[in-house]
Amino acid sequence: MLLYCRQKGSLIEIVGERGSGKTSILHMLCAVYTIENKRILYIDCSGNFRPERIRDYLEESHRFGNKEITAHLKNISFVRIYEPENIAGLLKKTKLLNIDCIVIDDLLILFLNSHRSKIRFEVRKVVREMALMALTKRINVVFTNLLIHRVESENSQPFCYELFYNDLIRYVHVKALLQKSINSVIHCNIVYPKNNFLNS
């Protein structure tokens, strides 16, 4: 997963069920980017941002003292978003910032709470803007999406679906699927592009 995140200019989607480790992957990604002295904009749409988790990852590397860790954490800018219409304005402002990566946690859940009639159009518009920004600024834009299990009837098999899948598929460059595990290991499979040697 981290190999894909090192390639500049990609829109990366991390998909998984609740509790599969999507936010933990974002925190790890932030720690890796800060070690490389890259600037990150972390956009939180659900209230799950925990800078202490990023600090823990930096401490576990055993490479830095307290002052260095604090200096690395200053490379992360944080914004909390509550409404879907705020994300479009924020993305326009972000074009002017000097950043290396944008991380958006639980972006599409914002749109579920909207009572507008053109939700799918708005999702496509925002995701298209994110893909264009990744390509034109040569930065990575990483966002998480929810995988939902559903059972139609008592006798049917459960099936999974991803929020707004058909609206995202044409814009996303890299898609990673996380699976829940019993232990603390996060299982991550790259769905596309298909390079089996990079699956982790």
Image (spheres, rainbow, N blue to C red):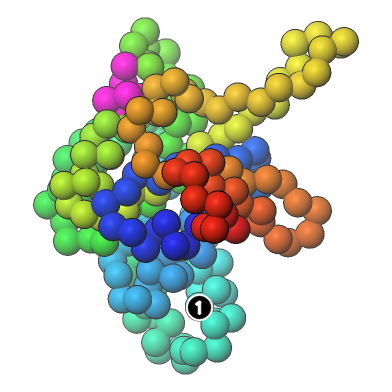
Q: Is residue 112 above or below residue 178?
A: above
Residue occupying the point 40% across, 58% down = 5
Q: What x and y, as percent, mark residue 147?
A: 60, 32
Q: Is residue 115 above or below residue 5?
A: above
Q: Nearest the camera: 193 or 171? A: 193
Q: What x and y, as percent, mark residue 66?
A: 46, 88
Identity, as a three-letter code, of the amino acid under mark 1: Leu
Q: Nearest the camera: 36 or 75? A: 36
Judge left or right: residue 182 versus residue 90: right
Q: What x and y, as percent, mark residue 9?
A: 26, 51
Dominant secondary structure, magenta: helix
Q: Is residue 40 above or below residue 104?
A: below
Q: Tag 1's secondary structure?
A: helix
Judge left or right: residue 176 versus residue 182: left
* Image quadrant in which you'd find residue 200: bottom right
Residue position for label 1: 58
Judge left or right: residue 160 versus residue 169: right
The span shown in magenta is 121-126
Q: What x and y, as percent, mark residue 119?
A: 37, 16
Residue occupying the point 16% across, 47% down = 136
